[in-house]
Amino acid sequence: MHAPTLIYETLHGSRAYGLARADSDHDYKGVVVGPPAWYFGFRGGPEQVELDKDHVRFELRKFVRLAAQGNPTLIELLFTHPDDRVVVTPAGQRLLDAREAFLSRRVEGSFGGYALQQLKRIRTHRRWLLEPPKGAPARADFGLPDHLKIPKDQLGAAEALIERGELGALPANFLDVLDRERRYRAAKRTWQQYRQWLKGRNPARAALEAKYGYDTKHALHLVRLLTMGAEILETGQVNVRRDDRDALLAIRDGALTYDQLEARAEALHQRVRAAAKRSSLPAEADEDALDALCVSIIEEVLAC
């Protein structure tokens, strides 16, 4: 089977941001066009190829689709510093030449959404640090029998109908049991997530959390994402290599208390929202034009 053709590859992550330290990984991401079988065969092909955890290559169609949606990682790949680009073929250069066409006001939701995920992790992990779950929840803790009395399929169907407001009046005892079942399952999920977090914690990250009371590395990326989102909306520029390196690394080193981080995050969210209202970027990328570009690049590579 023919191998995919690499058309573009760049350094990414902390080294591309200018935030690397001596022990930082070298993270590479690229774009490939698959062999003809990926596009014309009945089995298709993968959407991405993972050479290792720090080296990922995206199939062109996935790359274009996600970048058009404002995906922060893929937008960043198009705007890394030229010195960080390790492979740029003529087809890859065409992708770079069109990079401005991927920018739109969808950045508000995409960069802001990624930042919100970081903030949720910070809040959850801080809660676990300060008030760790004491043990696995038991059904009896919620006044429930040892075994589920209502079949799971019926329980799920009832919940869906209630959420849509289509079930009408139900006996109070049924709603009470349903509520307790929900709370038990939520507690069970939380316990499982907590145990997985404990098991998978990076020792260096755990040390940061123990020292500062929250994950300052997540905090760095939270502030970086929101700042970049605001800059894109305000100026149309994507500044991957950060001029605010020292300020971001200071956050990584605990310069902000947890309350100060929450305040900074809220102020940046407000800035992003205000910038989106004033931005001259289009509401969405021109997907027809980007689709045509994608087809043209694939045809060009396959013809070689």
Image (spheres, grey):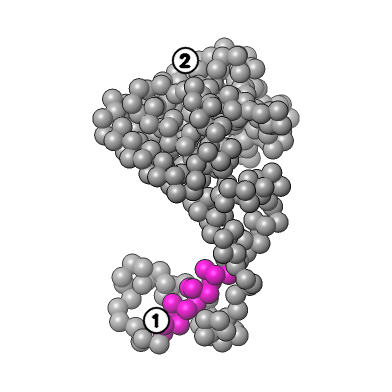
* Pointer 2 local density, CA inside 10 Å: few below 14, some 14–19, many at least 20: few
Question: In the picture, residue 50 is in which quadrant?
Answer: top right
Q: Position of residue 98 (x, y in %)?
A: 44, 18
**Magenta segment, which residues?**
174-188
Which residue is located at x 45 percent, y 49 percent? Answer: 259
Looking at the rendering, in which quadrant would you find the N terminus?
top right
Is 70 situated left or right of 49 in this image? left
194 is within the stretch colored magenta: no
Residue under label 2, please give it.
97
The quarter of the picture where the C terminus appears is: top right
Residue underneath mark 1: 175
Q: Residue at x 56, y 60 (%)?
A: 130
> For the residue labelled by badge 1, is the local secondary structure a helix, a strand or a loop?
helix
Kind of residue at disc 2:
Asp
- Badge 1 density bin: few <14, some 14–19, many ≥20, Cα 10 Å: some
Disc 2 is placed on an element classified as: helix
Q: Earlier in the sequence, mark 1 or mark 2?
A: 2
Question: Is residue 186 rendered magenta in the image?
Answer: yes
Please identify, in this view, whether the residue under mark 1 or under mark 2 is nearer the observer. 1
Residue at screen point 54% across, 27% down: 246
